[in-house]
Image (tube, grey):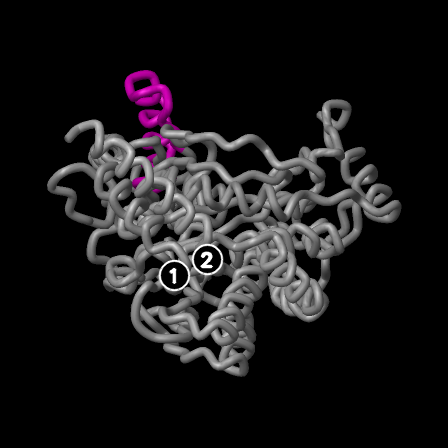
Amino acid sequence: MRNILIPIILILSTVLSHAQLEKMLSDSEKESICQSLDTRADAYFNTALEIWNYAEMGYQEEKSSALIKSILKEEGFRIESGVAEIPTAFIASYGSGSPVIGILGEYDALPGVSQTSSPFREKREDVVAGHACGHHLFGAGSMAAAIQVKNWMQANNQQGTVRFYGTPAEEGGGGKVYLVRAGLFDDVDAVLHWHPGNQNSAHAASSLANKSAKFRFYGTAAHAARYPFLGRSALDAVESMNFMVNLMREHIPQESRVHYVITSGGEAPNVVPEYAEVFYYCRHPDMKQVKENFEWIVKIAESAAKATETKMEYEVIHGLYNVLPNETLGRLMHDNLSYVGGYTYTPEEKAFAEKIVSTFSWGDNVSLNLTENIAPFKVIEKGEGGSTDVGDVSWAVATTGMRAATWVPGTSSHTWQAVAAGGTSIGKRGMLMAAKSISLTAIDLFRNPDTLAKAKSELIRRRGNGFKYEPLLGDRKPPLDYRM
């Protein structure tokens, strides 16, 4: 009996493998989808440039949000505005029923990096912020992918829903966390996203969890020369807190990162400051360790207030989970990015890139050929570098992302060089790579429910038994004025 079953199992396995392969997009189908995006590339990049010109900061992205919504509405998407009590957040949906594939889009700029598209430092006079993380490309590129997937669904009578999430204030505002907390991802089967970068990759990678807060101290003003003994310095409290936090660094796990800026330290040297504020970020690859480190920082702030006879209060600004990698979805995204491939600079782009590189102190080690390559796939379990509110999304639903070379290789995010490249054809070409890769990945997921099931199983396994989502920022309302 066993000898009979073995060939039957092998035959069934072969049939299933062929059936699975038939669901995958053929190269000709992929080429048709990519060509369709190419025909609208200029229009999509013009949208990105409009957002680049607006340069609106977190929770202030009124024009940027409205522009993307208007285009998606014209394309037949249903729009739900102001979700999760955030005026500039929205959901645009097409189709009905399952599966539901979500695509994330961001559009907030960063303060203090105003820049033209010049390869040398040249501030714009009309704005004080800049898209130093390329979210104008992120928003427009994801929008392009959502529209392309919608067009494919129409042409193929595909059941299901493609859903674009307009997510504001990624930079320090934690916009997506409020959407997760409101349950707006509860019925989603998979989420896709991307981010501008200086190379092309699609890893199953984690990030750093992050919790931030503004610590405010209140003292007593006095003449700093004649009556200093009558004053109680709020700035002394801030400095005491900072000193003790810097001592704390020795005794927390080495992967921890703590940064701060003094956002208010007094008005004049001859007046004892009655008010001072310091803004802290606390990071670690594990959100549980972030909680522990942050609680210690709060104790230090309380001690600083007691020691300086001032009063202290703090406001949590945002709290972000570390990204939960999903290898199932990550490998699929990598395969599609590899199909799309990188790009080679035109002579004009190369000349621009060389000028940008000349502004780097590390320019001798930069290879401009990185735009042509796709990095080998990796699973990165422990987060490095930055933090993102995509982290909270990834614990709610199976999620994967990619990076595209929208900046000159060697460029750091959050710099004027990133702003400059994002306003040129270099940004456009990277954005188009991302739109194509996300489109192909979303369509593959619509055609392969088994892949979605496998991705969800991986999510549940990685979260662990008994997981219950509790946002690091607690029950606070969105800090709509945190950039004001």
Q: Is residue 111 left or right of residue 96?
A: right
Which residue is identified by label 1? 101
Based on the picture, tell me whether residue 236 belongs to the magenta stretch: yes
Secondary structure category for the residue under label 2 = helix
Q: Which residue is mark 2?
A: 442
Q: Residue at x 34, y 75 (%)?
A: 96
Magenta-drawn segment: 231-258
The residue located at (41%, 59%) in the rendering is 447
- Tell me, yes or no, if residue 110 can be seen here: no
Q: Earlier in the sequence, mark 2 or mark 1?
A: 1
The answer to whether 344 appears left or right of 98 in the picture is right
From the viewer's perspective, is 7 left or right of 107? left
Are there few (<14), some (14-19), or many (20+) residues within 10 Å of tag 1? many
Rendering coords of residue 57 (x, y %): 52, 60
Image quadrant in which the N terminus is located: top left
**414 is higher (above) or lower (below) than 104:** above
